[in-house]
Amino acid sequence: MALIDAPPLTPLPPAPALLSVSDLEVTLFTRAGQLKAVDRLSLEVAAGETLAIVGESGCGKSISALALMRLLPEPPAKITGGSVRLAGRDLTRLSEGEMQRVRGKDLAMIFQDPMSALNPVLTVGRQIVEVIARHDPASHRAMQARALELMRKVRIPDAERRFNDYPHQLSGGMNQRIVIAMAIACQPKVLVADEPTTALDVTIQAQILDLMKELQAETGMGLIIITHDLGVVAETADRVLVMYAGRKVEDGTVDAVFDRPLHPYTRGLMGATPSATLQPHGRLAEIPGSVPALADLPAGCAFNNRCPIAFARCFAERPGLTMPAPARSVACFAVEQEGVRHGDPVGA
Amino acid sequence: MSLTTSSLTTSPLATSPSTTSPAAPAPAPLVTPVVLAGRRRSPVLDFCRRFARNPAALVGLVLVLALVAVALAAPYYYPRDPLRIVGRPELWPFTNPRFPLGTDSLGRDIAAVVAHGARTTLMIGLFASLTATLIGVGVGATAAYFGGWVDEVLMRVTELFQTVPNIIFILTVVAVLGQSIGNITIAVGVVTWTPIARMTRAEFLALRDREFVQACRAMGMGDVRIMLGEILPNALPPVIVLSSLVVASAVLFESAVSFLGLGDPNVASWGGLIGQGRTLIRSSWYICAVPGVAIMLTVLALNLVGDGLNDALNPKLRDR
Amino acid sequence: MRRILLRRFAQIIPLILGVIVLNFALIQMSPGSFLDVMTAEQQVSDPAMIERMRVLYGMDKPVIIQLLKYIWSVLTLDFGYSYRQNETVLAVIMQALPATVILMLASIAIALLVGVLAGVVAAVKVNTLWDNLISVGAVFFFAAPTFWLGIMLMIVFSVRLGWLPVGGMRDIGVDHGVIGIALDVMRHLALPALSLGLFYAAMYTRVMRASMLEVFRHDFVRTARAKGLSGAQVVVRHVFRNALLPVVTLLGLQLGTVLGGSVVIETVFSWPDIGSLMLDSVMSRNYPVVLGVLVLSSLIVAVANALVDIAYFRLDPRIRAR
């Protein structure tokens, strides 16, 4: 395993962290053995802040998000270490019943495909009312009025009429608005959005992102956006966290990371071009090779078989996170050696 | 039989190169030989291996084979007419070594009736299923291949046969045409073909516009030849599964007809034995119980085999 | 909505015409003459009667005219005359119909209740002892012939334990008003409905279990959990209704089989329904009744089928849109 331990959490975060995840570990129990789908992941989100988690598919982003919600598909996957503190409470230690009162109220989630995220046989209005009824029950009339209010808030035109529509009668963008309305119904402290715009048209994407930012400004909730799309990151996020093979390989403010990506994987994602000229739609650039399956991660750094600058040490050991600059961390031996702005390499 | 197939088929797995050097830098060449090995394996062996992995299906297969053995051996063990009276009536099972399963209300040997009944049951089940498959495949294939009004009419006919209460239809046929094994078999086939027709139609519709069929059409092949020679073999696996399940329901229908006393009076049958023993449930309930267990085990075994065939032939459709 | 209802019920008409044609074909295929069949081989000797039937069924006309005449007579609910009961066939059948419908509905109710419940339990507790017990039970009840199950239940509950009546629909002398009669009928109904219902319950258990497991994998279930709903709420409000759809489809497809099954079951329990009439008519070659039963029972199935379709339509809003 890595010789260099992860550094202690950022000593003094700018704002008190609302959600603070430390050393989160998710293990998949498969017939082939135990696989670490998420390996010692730490992150923090402050009120009103947006954190973007990026990486190719299969790198553990979505699993991390589900782990925060404690919605992992439980026979194979399980949280096996670390903590998830939301306003000081460790969610990993809550009972399922307690967690149910957190989900949808303090911590809410938006999913990738709005067409399949809604129950096809219930009206959208009823599905919104359901969240309110669960966490904040009131008279039927009052809850219905609140659901309508929410539908107007997420800009559903003609909300009264749409209230009794079924998901298949609405467009993808409208359905995603419904999903968002459900998510913000009880003013969550933190909202996790797993690829909220991937399944939508480009024009709708921008509208949805604007809506989310607006709602965030209004409520001051923390936002975690999981995405493939660097355009989304640039547009919405304050900080960005890059994941590869279940681990954080780099994080920092969006400006810092886009100006100066340190990890070769991050650089690869950005297509080794300046951030201004991203690929069309800001999609991640193609990196030769593919994310290795968890079952056969290479020895040493998980990225070594695709890394253009890998050297002997990368095949022998796994790099730990170092902090080359304040509020910035990266896990790469090359960065360590070259001493790109020798910060304070911890433990080396 | 199952032993040899499983030992044969496990060997290519064991020698496949998947266990060597997992940490090799380039994963691509590692994957291909495994796939190739999978291709090279004969589809029949592959099927047997998948079937043998399912213990319930194996149990079913063993039961079916045992039933076939009983049916084949019946004329040798009980060469005389099983419906003749051989002993004291209402002898309980295991009380007289000559009649291990006892005797019925008239003094007939239940074991002999059950053994010969297995022949009747299997024959009717098999031929009814064959009839149903022929009708079903014919209707379904024609409907899908030609489409348009042909499809419309044939599907209405299918719906019609689905609507007519099947036992009532069988009874009507038997009433009008006479109580013979042949009429019962055909009547059972005529009420069980509808699911096969629907399945065949769906499969044909999926296959009809595929490239290889269009190529045949471009080559000027006749409709019948394309349907039978090109599409049918590809559509067959799910049809086989359904046909095997139809055997099970045919057995149930036949037993019901015989139970009602409308079976062929000259043939030993399980349902008939239950029907005759029904009046004696206060004193000798075993007369009903024994053939009923035989029917249940047969249907159970056929269902298990059908489910196993389904899993083995349609690996995609499996749960996990 | 009304238009869809009308269109659905209009589809019954060609079906019934089909059944009548089928009937006619069967009569033509029978060894005797049309007249033999329609007089149930009763050797009607009254020449006036024979002459009347000759005209009624167009015996001297070509087959196609005979068919049209036959269709017309059936459509005017004239199924002929039953000499055995000395009543019109329609009257004979209508007397037996209520008992059949009661048995059919009770069996379907049991099948749905038991099957859906067991399927839900098996799916929620998948791969546990409960799941295994339910699945094994389903496999067995799915293989047992209903009439045999009926006899076995009768041996246990009526003969040995003496809890329930052996057969019939009502006890003689029980007359304590409507409720008393209803209770008495239900006591008689229990075993026949159970033996027929359990077979279908076994089938629905398997379908419901598979369908629940399928629905559990859908994204909207995860959304429901992300809202903070409890496990029970997720199952009841979100999984259950979606999982029910295949069961309803299956139910619609099987109404004919259920009705056929009740014919067999009733002979076990001497339930005085169409089954006994049918059997008696088959035995005595009373063809007009046999054919009338075939047409009327098909009509019941077709109507019930339309009702099931409408239920499906109410359950699945996606169909409604089309």
Image (cartoon, coloured by chain):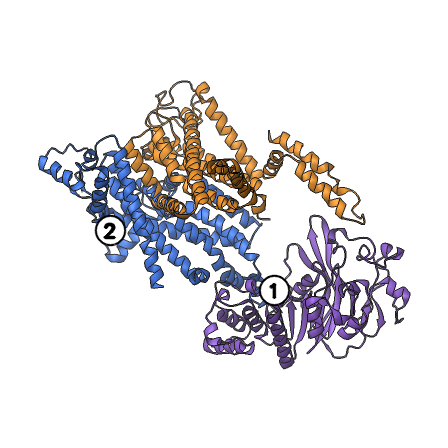
Q: Residue at x 18, y 40 (%)?
A: C57
Q: Position of residue A112 (x, y in %)?
A: 61, 64
Give the amino acid type for the residue marked by disc 1 in the picture.
Ala
In the rendered structure, the residue with mark 1 lies on which chain? Answer: A
For discs 2 and 1, the disc positioned in front in the rendered view: 1
Q: Colour of chain A?
A: purple
Q: Which element carries disc 2, helix, strand or loop?
A: loop
Snapshot quadrant of residue A191: bottom right
Snapshot quadrant of residue B18: top right
Q: Position of residue B177 (x, y in %)?
A: 29, 32
Task: Name the side, left or right, on which A78 lies relative to A345.
Answer: left
**Residue C170 seen:** no
Residues C222 and C205: in front is C222
Q: Which chain is blue?
A: C
Q: Which residue is mark 2?
A: C174
**Distance of mark 2 from mark 1, alpha carbons?**
68 Å
Give the amino acid type for the residue marked by disc 2 in the picture.
Val
Q: Which element carries disc 1, helix, strand or loop?
A: loop
In the rendered structure, the residue with mark 2 lies on which chain? Answer: C
Task: Name the side, left or right, on which B25 lies relative to B123.
Answer: right
Q: Which chain is orange?
A: B
Q: Position of residue B55 (x, y in %)?
A: 58, 38
